[in-house]
């Protein structure tokens, strides 16, 4: 009987392709292994999904597998079937889904293939890693003769001189001919090259002394016992660990992991932003030593691969990372933890649009593992699952340190309260006074403002015209940095501030509103002795953000001004005042989750005030102090908010009381996009589920953000109570995509989060 196999190739097609397995390769062609196959006229790298015995269908001649790349399947079978399920759930091409989980190819394996006569070119576009050594180039003190260097050699040398030593692989990311350039520079004595072991990951830079696990308090103990029981049954189970900030959730995670490891199984821990949580990683290291893999975007390709390999072989049993950690090839997976499960970053918003929290539940279920979702402000989805009996709730009602109390929250009604001495409306008198008092006491302040830049809009004082991006339907933000520029926060367009209004020509442009840049400046002027710093995407990403947070913890900053980034991260030291400059910015977005997200943000940022022995104060400024999100945040009453919000959602029939699938349609031409959206909607409406109204079809309609990067955006929203019916209608509508004008981009977003 001939052997056949199904291979997923990296093309955006939903199906896999059949190939014949030559006898010589029969033993090594296994599900989860990478193979080289002929596809069209090229050879491509594919992944074996399944093998079967049997003959090709009548009249079909299957091509043979050309070569097997991995001696051992790269994807364990548990992970492979999870990926296939994910692909089907999200209507995402299997080839693209696999790419999320596949490691780079090792050079050694490439060499073996070349020895078999496979063209090296085939794999040239595939990421390769290998060997333990990395080649570095370092500038010497030698000076070149004027005029001898041209082109990339000159640029490479300039970069090395300004940066110091760099891996040659990094240079290659910037310069195609970096290798040749370095060789030339080396021959001129201008640089030296050296092969060395790759650096240890920054997360492991300092040794971390082992800690002594504290005795659990009663609530923690009860939670741990439930998780332990589930682990020892080795059946799948899922929990929502609902505990206020500082209630000791992390300690429960640590115990659960220990329990999982004790049973010889591995664990995945997902956190929203790994770069902002080095303290969390430090706590894990203190408990489990360095036998954990920290997967983060700062890793070089070879470090990432080294980590991946240690996880795949079972040498390391715990993987920590952001949402993509859900794809870690942990052996004998026993536990998945999702910390801050409500966080929006678990939803990937491009390419394969998956939700890592939902997928954690799925993967754990299929792997007979335990899932623990933790939060101080759980998502309505998770709370709903608790009510349906699909998640078991574990409560940690109090902060772990008995003396730590929740901060006192007051609202400032911006309609009635005037500005303080700065004259800025958003720095109200009560906020100004609170700042004075806190600084006088030598304590720290966090000011949270949802707007980057100096001024959120540039307005003509003569005609009222607001400067907007030419490519997007949004106002341009004025940034003070680099001499003052207007920037679009959606497409990153940047340009000079015009001298006059583009509408009426009047030379009277005003900078309106308050952004973090201006806030930082205003506070620094009003409190000249205070050390003021800012944390937002413009000044910091990843490691730099952590450096600012570290200064904050060390007490080298008095007032930290910033966007959402200040709400993340742990213990910020001596903070006793948190000011929310404008709560309405988040709460008034045209999105059915605006209130939920705004509430989470308020609770999260309020949680930064007063940890340990110092009581904290929170001031929330708003034009509508009566709105529920503000009222419940003020009373720290998360449960009551959830109750209220669930009732609201039930009334309007939005998730978690229904399920959604969103078709995002965009094109450069408005009419073309509108028509395509119409075709999608028509297919959905004429599907059996659409006709029987089991599935509601809303739209086609212009998206709230009607234009982005020059493309007109439309959407068609499908909504249903029944998941299977929604899937059927979504499939019917998706079937229309191939018929649609090629200039149109259509994306299916199952369980969408971003609604703009
Ligand atoms: P969360 O993850 O819920 O924010 P943490 O686990 O970070 O809470 O706990 C907050 C603080 O309380 C930490 O400093 C932690 O070391 C401490 N802590 C947690 N559990 C206990 C305990 N049982 N006894 C003493 N201290 C504890
Ligand atoms: Zn733009």
Image (cartoon, rainbow, N blue to C red):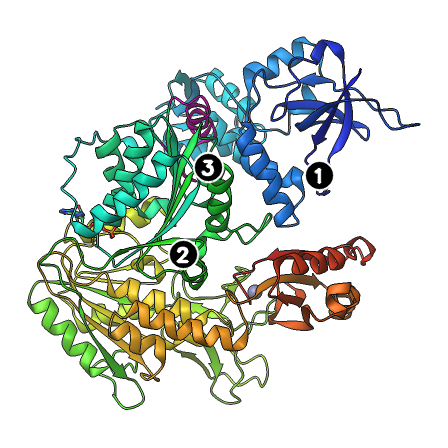
> Vertical placement of 497 versus 542: above or below?
below
State the SS at label 2: loop
State the SS at label 3: loop
State the SS at label 1: loop
Q: Is label 1 or label 2 in front? A: 2
Q: Position of residue 117 (x, y in %)?
A: 71, 11
Please say whether residue 467 is visible from this viewpoint.
Answer: no
Residue under circle 1? 11
Query: Looking at this view, is 472 or 573 the one in front?
Result: 573
Residue under circle 2? 343
The reply to whether the magenta stretch includes residue 309 is yes
Query: Looking at this view, is 270 or 171 the one in front?
Result: 270
Please report whichever mark, 3 or 2, sits nearer to the chain's N-terminal start.
2
The residue sitting at 66% across, 40% down in the picture is: 94
Q: For residue 139, which quarter of the picture?
A: top left
Q: Position of residue 330 (x, y in %)?
A: 44, 30
Extent of the magenta region? 293-315
Q: For residue 482, which quarter of the picture?
A: bottom left
Labelled disc at residue 368: 3
């Amino acid at each position: 009987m001939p052997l056949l196999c199904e291979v997923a190739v990296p093309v955006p097609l939903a199906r896999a392709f059949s190939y014949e397995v030559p006898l010589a390769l029969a033993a090594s062609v296994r599900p989860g292994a990478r193979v080289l196959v002929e596809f069209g006229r090229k050879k491509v790298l594919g992944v074996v999904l399944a093998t079967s015995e049997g003959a090709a269908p009548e009249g079909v001649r299957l091509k043979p597998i050309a070569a097997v790349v991995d001696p051992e399947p790269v994807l364990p079978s548990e992970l492979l079937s999870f990926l296939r399920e994910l692909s089907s759930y999200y209507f995402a091409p299997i080839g693209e889904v696999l790419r999320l989980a596949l490691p780079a190819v090792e050079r050694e394996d490439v060499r073996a293939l070349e020895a078999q006569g496979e063209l090296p070119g085939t794999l040239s576009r595939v990421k390769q890693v290998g060997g333990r050594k990395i080649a570095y180039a370092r500038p010497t003190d030698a000076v070149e003769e004027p005029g001898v260097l041209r082109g990339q050699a000159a640029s490479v040398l300039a970069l090395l001189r300004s940066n110091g030593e760099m891996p040659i692989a990094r240079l290659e990311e910037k310069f195609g001919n970096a290798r040749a350039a370095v060789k030339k520079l080396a021959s001129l004595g201008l640089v030296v090259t050296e092969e060395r072991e790759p650096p240890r990951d920054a997360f492991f830079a300092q040794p971390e002394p082992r800690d002594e696990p504290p005795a659990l308090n009663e609530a923690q103990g009860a939670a741990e016992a439930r998780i332990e029981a589930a682990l020892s049954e080795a059946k799948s189970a899922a929990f929502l660990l609902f505990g206020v900030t500082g209630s000791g959730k992390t300690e429960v995670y640590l115990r659960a992991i220990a329990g999982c490891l004790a049973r010889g199984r591995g664990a995945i821990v997902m956190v929203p932003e790994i770069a902002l949580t080095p303290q969390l990683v430090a706590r894990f290291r203190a408990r489990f030593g360095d036998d954990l893999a920290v997967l983060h975007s700062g890793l070089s390709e070879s470090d990432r691969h080294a980590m991946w390999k240690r996880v795949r072989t079972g040498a390391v049993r715990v993987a920590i990372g952001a949402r993509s950690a859900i794809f870690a090839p942990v052996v004998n997976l026993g536990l998945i933890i999702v910390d801050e499960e409500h966080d929006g970053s678990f939803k990937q918003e491009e390419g394969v649009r998956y939700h890592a929290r939902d997928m954690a539940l799925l993967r754990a279920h299929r792997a007979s593992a335990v899932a623990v979702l933790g939060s101080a402000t759980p998502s309505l989805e998770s709370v709903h699952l608790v009510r349906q009996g699909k998640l078991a709730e574990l409560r940690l009602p109090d902060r772990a340190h008995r003396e730590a109390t929740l901060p006192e929250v007051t609202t400032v009604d911006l309609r009635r309260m005037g500005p303080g001495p700065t004259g800025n409306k958003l720095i109200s008198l009560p906020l100004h006074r609170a700042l004075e008092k806190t600084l006088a006491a030598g304590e720290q302040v966090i000011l949270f403002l949802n707007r980057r830049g100096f001024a959120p809009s540039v307005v003509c004082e003569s005609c009222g015209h607001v400067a907007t991006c030419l490519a997007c339907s949004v106002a341009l933000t004025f940034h003070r940095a680099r001499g003052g520029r207007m920037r679009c926060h959606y497409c990153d367009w940047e340009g000079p501030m015009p001298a006059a209004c583009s509408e009426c020509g009047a030379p009277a442009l005003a900078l309106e509103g308050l952004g973090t840049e201006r806030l930082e400046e205003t506070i620094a002027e009003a409190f000249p002795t205070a050390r003021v710093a800012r944390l937002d995407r413009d000044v910091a990403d990843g490691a730099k953000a952590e450096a600012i947070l570290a200064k904050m913890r060390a007490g080298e900053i008095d007032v930290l001004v910033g966007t959402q980034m200040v709400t993340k991260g742990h213990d910020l030291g001596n903070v006793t005042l948190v000011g929310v400059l404008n709560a309405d910015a988040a709460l008034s977005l045209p999105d059915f989750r605006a209130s939920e997200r705004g509430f989470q943000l308020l609770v999260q940022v309020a949680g930064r005030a007063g940890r340990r022995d110092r009581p904290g104060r929170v001031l929330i400024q708003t034009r509508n102090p009566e709105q529920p999100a503000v009222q419940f945040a003020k009373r720290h009453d998360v449960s009551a908010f959830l109750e209220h919000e669930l009732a609201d959602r039930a009334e309007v029939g939005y998730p978690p009381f229904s399920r959604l699938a969103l078709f995002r349609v965009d094109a450069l031409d408005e009419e073309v996009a509108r028509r395509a959206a119409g075709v999608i909607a028509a297919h959905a409406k004429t599907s059996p589920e659409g006709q029987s109204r089991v599935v509601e079809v809303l739209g086609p309609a212009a998206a709230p953000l009607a234009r982005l990067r020059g493309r007109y955006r439309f959407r068609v929203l499908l909504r249903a109570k029944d998941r299977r019916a929604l899937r059927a209608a979504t499939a019917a509508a998706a079937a229309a995509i191939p018929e649609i004008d090629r200039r149109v981009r259509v994306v299916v977003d199952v369980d969408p989060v971003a609604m703009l």
